[in-house]
Image: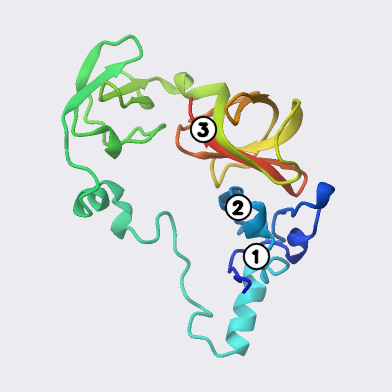
């Protein structure tokens, strides 16, 4: 059997590449392209996957649905985390008993105590609202220190970084990255991508050097690497 996905990726993305490997490409509809989420597919999975919407835009797909009298033809699009009511992911985690409140410190980048929090799981890098702090200038979450249960905040400039490590990397055109190459790196789904040099490290890790500093690079997010429309591969941001 071949699983057919609703992800808008090109059908020719399954064509064999160098060394007989299967490749993954961006979809035609750049606004709805889902290749960022599928970088981790293995070769055996790509070999059996089909993406029939790859050459269609969202409006094309809706027109087909209308022609087939499907009630989803004009369904409103889901935004953010579609299965979490009101985008309250903190409440969702608690309701699902995935995390409970546990008090910790909010400190600045110098370690000065500014306040307290109920759990680092309820915060995200780049967050400004909902910190419960009184400061003379805006501050943002710049780091989550899980080991010490600390939320670290700083000014806007503290969010900018030009280098990080990606782990558990997966590659499509080749088995392993063996030398530095130039790519376009996406550090989150709605990120436009930025030129970068990626260099192999041991332990299936990759050093990512961005040509221009980027805001709110977040550990746990995927970093996906492209060359034109080809998905070269990706990994998970660690630091």
Determine the secondary structure under disc 3: strand
Q: What colour scheme does the image use? A: rainbow
Which of the two labelled residues, at mark 2 and mark 1, occupies the earlier sequence position? 2
Task: Examine the rendering and report whether any part of residue 8 can be seen.
Answer: yes
On screen, residue 80 above or below 3: above
- Mark 3–mark 2 Cα distance, whole angstroms, equals 17 Å
Asked whether the beta carbons under mark 2 and mark 1 sit within 8 Å of each other, the answer is: yes
Asked whether the beta carbons under mark 1 and mark 3 sit within 8 Å of each other, the answer is: no
Q: Which mark is residue 237?
A: 3
The quarter holding residue 31 reads bottom right
Determine the secondary structure under disc 2: loop
Q: Residue at x 66, y 58 (%)?
A: 46
Q: Which mark is residue 146?
A: none
Residue occupied by mark 1: 49
On screen, residue 58 above or below 140: below
Q: Is residue 17 left or right of residue 126?
A: right
Determine the secondary structure under disc 1: loop
On screen, residue 38 above or below 135: below
């Amino acid at each position: 059997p071949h699983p057919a996905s609703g992800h808008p990726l090109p059908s020719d993305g399954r064509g064999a590449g160098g060394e007989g490997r299967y490749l993954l490409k961006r979809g035609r509809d750049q606004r709805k392209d889902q290749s960022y989420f599928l970088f981790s597919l293995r070769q055996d999975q790509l070999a059996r996957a089909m993406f029939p919407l790859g050459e269609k835009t969202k409006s094309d797909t809706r027109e087909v649905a209308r022609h087939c009298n499907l009630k989803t033809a004009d369904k409103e699009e889901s935004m953010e985390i579609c299965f979490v009511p009101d985008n309250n992911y903190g409440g969702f985690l608690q309701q699902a008993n995935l995390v409970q409140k546990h008090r910790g410190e909010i400190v600045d980048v110098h370690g000065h105590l500014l306040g307290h929090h109920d759990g680092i799981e309820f915060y995200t890098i780049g967050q400004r609202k909902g910190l419960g702090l009184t400061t003379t200038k805006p501050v943002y979450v710049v780091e989550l220190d899980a080991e010490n249960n600390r939320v670290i905040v700083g000014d806007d400039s503290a969010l900018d970084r030009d280098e990080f490590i990606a782990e558990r990397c997966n590659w499509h055109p080749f088995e392993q990255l063996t030398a530095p190459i130039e790519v376009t790196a996406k550090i989150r789904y709605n990120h436009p991508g930025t030129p970068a040099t990626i260099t192999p490290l041991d332990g299936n890790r990759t050093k990512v050097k961005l040509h221009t500093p980027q805001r709110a690079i977040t550990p746990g997010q995927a970093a996906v690497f492209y060359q034109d429309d080809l998905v070269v591969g990706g990994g998970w941001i660690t630091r």
